[in-house]
Amino acid sequence: MDIFFFVLEITGTAAFAVSGSLLALTKGMDLFGICIMGLVTACGGGVMRDLFLDQLPPAMFREPVYALTAIGVSLVMFLPFVRRLLSRGEKVYEAVLLIADSLGLGIFTAAGVAAAIKAGYGGNFFFAVFLGTVTGVGGGVMRDVLAGLPPYIFVKHIYASASIAGAILCAALWHFTGQPWAMLACLVLVFVIRILAARYRWSLPKAKL
């Protein structure tokens, strides 16, 4: 079970690192900036999760493999041949960003719910869903703030709502299907909602003055 959780988190770390470093590339940041953006996006949500659970120091400092994975992926994204591939067209860039961001969101939403339940909060459904959502969207919010952009979760297609839906499903299924199936169901639901929201331009209602 621990190996399953570890593999899932490493995959999510790599996916979010791609998302963060891609945005840094479009902003013309240098190598250091790209690595920081990848690191913050990949590990920011996990740090927030650990702070809520009072698990100090956060996992990225106790187990450097997560931070090293994020930095390593960011360095790969900086390689000339990778940048040439991404520069072939806007659709290539958008597709890579969407898939990486959606995958990371689904994985870390599930990881946040799992962390809450493992910490003894399985009976607190609201907190498990809240922590799953914070873990999923936290790194992306930090990424956007560092890039000088309005946080993606407030202005773009359905994003935080997908994380909430996945967290609810994961917490609801946990005691019926067990950890692996509950987390996989969360991942699939979040990923599908994000892809469909981008494809059909689904958005929550917006208010204008």
Image: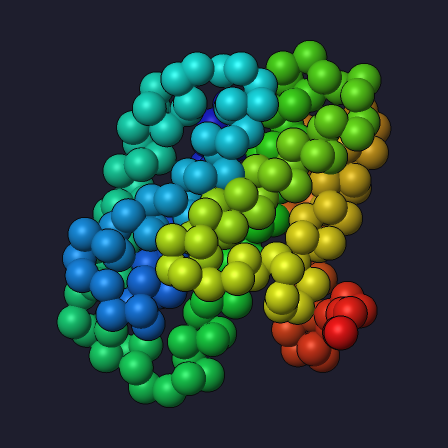
Residue drawn at x 41%, y 39% is 43
Residue drawn at x 50%, y 51% is 140
Instruction: Provide residue 167's location: percent of width, then percent of height.
Output: 72, 40
Q: Is residue 47 left or right of residue 196?
A: left
Residue drawn at x 31%, y 31% is 65
Q: Quadrant of the C terminus?
A: bottom right
Q: Is residue 76 left or right of residue 23?
A: left
Q: Which is nearer the eye, 89 or 145?
A: 145
Q: Quadrant of the N terminus?
A: top right
Answer yes or no: is residue 113 visible: yes
Q: Is residue 10 left or right of residue 116?
A: left
Instruction: Provide residue 40's location: percent of width, then percent of height.
Output: 38, 44
Q: Which is nearer the eye, 207 or 102?
A: 207
Answer yes or no: is residue 191 visible: no
Residue drawn at x 73%, y 54% is 161
Among all residues in the image, which is located at the extreme front? 209
In the figure, 59 relative to 26: above or below?
A: above
Q: What is the number of callouts on the image? A: 0
Among all residues in the image, which is located at the extreme bottom? 89
Which quadrant would residue 121 be assigned to in this image? top right
In the figure, 147 relative to 93: above or below?
A: above
Instruction: Provide residue 59's location: percent of width, then percent of height.
Output: 41, 24
Applied colour scheme: rainbow
In the figure, 104 relative to 62: above or below?
A: below
Q: Is residue 40 left or right of residue 191?
A: left
Instruction: Provide residue 67's location: percent of width, then percent of height.
Output: 31, 36
